[in-house]
Amino acid sequence: MPSYIPQGYAPLLGLYDTQKAIGLIKRLFEDHLCGALSLHRVTAPLFVEASTGLNDDLNGVERPVSFDIPAAGAEAQVVHSLAKWKRMALYRYGFHAGTGLLTDMNAIRRDEELDNLHSVYVDQWDWEKVIAPRDRTEEYLRATVRAIVGAICATQTGLRNVYGRTCSLPQLEEEVTFVTSQELEDRYPDLTPRERENAFVREHHTTFVQNIGGALRSGQVHDGRAPDYDDWNLNGDILFWNDVLGQAFEVSSMGIRVSPEVLDRQLTLAGCDDRRQLPFHRMLLEGHLPQTIGGGIGQSRLCMLLLGKAHIGEVQSSVWDRGTVRVCREAAVPLL
């Protein structure tokens, strides 16, 4: 869907106040999230060697930005995300159960369609936490989701304390409604997955959609997930209702990560058995990597939501198509 600006929309904050508010959101949220999940900041790579298998394959069709490094005799790829790298880092750094890491992830997804929510530049908080085998449960997953939503709402409270006197910022609902992708299909069999999310989140403004990646009873999938990081039965997306755009708004994709047994099964289901010989996958299948939970939380997405912005270009600098530039210019909406 091409970029559009809703009729009557006007930014709540000016250009410079928006920049200051973005900085405040990032500082507040990092503090709240690290406190809620016992995370510690680390430094992460912008690119990884293609041969390691550490890059995220997303839906399996996106092309990574690749380049050669003559001095190292290696082929590198700009990361799509850090889903696998984080788990390896927890192993290398010696983290123990109950603690984890947080890092800034900056990526280029050149095949991304450009619209109000999507850019070729991706910025997110990537986090990963070591868990005990007994924590591979739906209850643990849901408790973690509630902690993340709590951190988001606490950030919004801090933001409203600073800017609430000058503008009416969005108010989020902290209570989370949990629903599986199969329950959505059963409830709305004639709708597409995105339409199902819109219909449900319109009624339940803060929702976690569980179990994404595996085939539903219809034979279709709710959304694509790579087979080698999330357990498709213990993952999901955090969605908020976005009043400005009138739609469900995904802020985070997350989940309990694959165990050796789950990885073995999902690689076969996805037709990706060739990955078994990659270093990361071999270590995981042999049981060398810790059990973890983790996810990504969109930085620009969260800023959009908390500041009531209509377009992601209002909170990040990127490259846009001529149609987007024209639509925003005609609506007097500044792109950073």
Image (cartoon, rainbow, N blue to C red):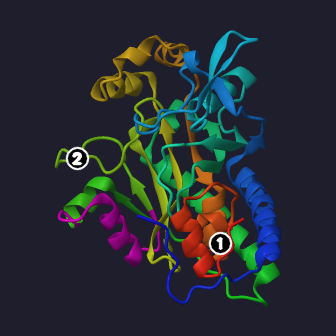
- If the image is split into quadrants, where does the C terminus sit? bottom right
Q: Is residue 96 magenta?
A: no
User: Quarter-wise, where is residue 24 in the image?
Assistant: bottom right
Q: CA distance from mark 2 to mark 1?
A: 33 Å
Q: Is residue 148 visible?
A: yes
Residue 205: percent from left, percent from top? 46, 74
Circle 2 packing at 10 Å, graded few (<14), some (14-19), many (20+), is few
Which circle's residue, 2 or 1, is located before the other in the chain?
Answer: 2
According to the picture, the residue beneath numbered tag 2 turns out to be: 220
Circle 1 packing at 10 Å, graded few (<14), some (14-19), many (20+), is many
The residue at the point 65 percent across, 77 percent down is 333
Magenta highlight range: 188-207
- If the image is split into quadrants, where does the N terminus sit? bottom left
Residue 324: percent from left, percent from top? 54, 66
Residue 240: percent from left, percent from top? 50, 68
Left or right side of 128 for 192: left
Residue type at numbered disc 2? Gln
Give the secondary structure at mark 1: helix
Q: Which labelled disc corresponds to residue 243?
A: none
In the rendered picture of this protein, how many numbered marks are placed on residues?
2
Residue type at numbered disc 1? Leu
Left or right side of 260 for 170: right
Residue 186: percent from left, percent from top? 20, 61
Q: Is residue 116 visible?
A: no
Give the secondary structure at mark 2: loop
Viewer-closest of 44 and 154: 44
Q: Is residue 20 above or below residue 256?
A: below
Q: Is residue 321 above or below residue 265?
A: below
The residue at the point 31 percent across, 54 percent down is 181
Q: Is residue 192 magenta?
A: yes
According to the picture, the residue beneath numbered tag 1 turns out to be: 306
The residue at the point 60 percent across, 42 percent down is 108
